[in-house]
Amino acid sequence: MAKTRPIAMGVASISLATYGDGVPGSDFKALPLPFKGSVAFNFADPKEVKIETEGTDEPLYVSLLKDSTDYIEFAIPTPDNETVKTLKGGTISNGGGSKDIWEEASSFESINKTVKIETMPHKGAKVVYTIVNGKIMAKFSQAPGAEQSELLLVRVYKQAAITAAGVVKTAFTREVASAG
């Protein structure tokens, strides 16, 4: 019997966890919901390497190699400073009082997390996408204006999931799960 096809539409949550030893983290913390329509999968097409011979238009052999890094991208509108710190690094201070000030780090911080994106449930199921070991890069990509909000653009680059013992594990999963 064929399984029911899930309806993968809408984003119910995006959450982060500390990367495990070649496996996804387990203690996930939800991020604010993304800007509508901003979630994008940027999985690169492979680079074609071919051996061509005289006398034919068709190659003798074709090999496909990964040419660039896969990533998932989304934007968070008007994030709080804790979210900015989580995704960009830096520190939060009170400015000597009751202020809420995010201060950028003096150098680019290396932030690795497990990232999980869950779709809205449809017909009793949802789809869960997980980057096991994601390198996070975030930047302010849109300034606030009369008809637009500030946006924090987030990219999660897929990295290898390798244990301390050197065992290579899967770096990305797509799970069809019960909505309950």
Image (cartoon, grey):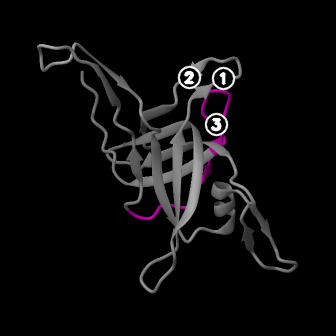
Which mark lies nearer to you, 1 or 3? 1
Percent across and percent down for residue 63 are 32, 20
Q: Residue at x 65, y 37 (%)?
A: 19
Q: Are marks 1 and 2 in contact (CB under 8 Å)?
A: yes
- Image point (39%, 40%), residue name: 43
Q: Which residue is mark 1?
A: 163
Q: What whole-number distance in Å separates the C-alpha atoms at marks 2 and 3?
A: 13 Å
Residue 109: x and y in percent read 70, 51
The residue drawn where x is 71% and y is 64% is 104
| Residue of label 2 | 169
Query: Picture coordinates of residue 107 (x, y %)?
Result: 72, 56
Label 2 element class:
strand
Q: Characterize the local packing of mark 3: few (<14), some (14-19) or many (20 or more) Cα atoms within 10 angstroms.
A: some
Q: From what the image shows, is residue 143 above or below residue 119?
A: below
SS at badge 1: loop
Whether residue 31 is situated above or below residue 174 in the rendered picture: below
> What is the distance, in whole Å, between disc 1 and disc 3 at their CAs?
13 Å
Q: Main secondary structure of the magenta part?
A: loop
Magenta residues, start to end: 17-36
Residue type marked 3: Gly
Q: Is residue 133 magenta?
A: no
| Residue type, mark 1 in image | Thr
**Residue located farthest toward the right when viewing the structure as drawn:** 96
Real-space CA distance between mark 1 and mark 2, rounded to the nearest whole angstrom: 8 Å
Q: Nearer the viewer, residue 158 or 116?
A: 158
| Residue that badge 3 annotates | 25
Q: Is residue 26 magenta?
A: yes
**Which marked residue is nearer to the observer: mark 2 or mark 3?**
2
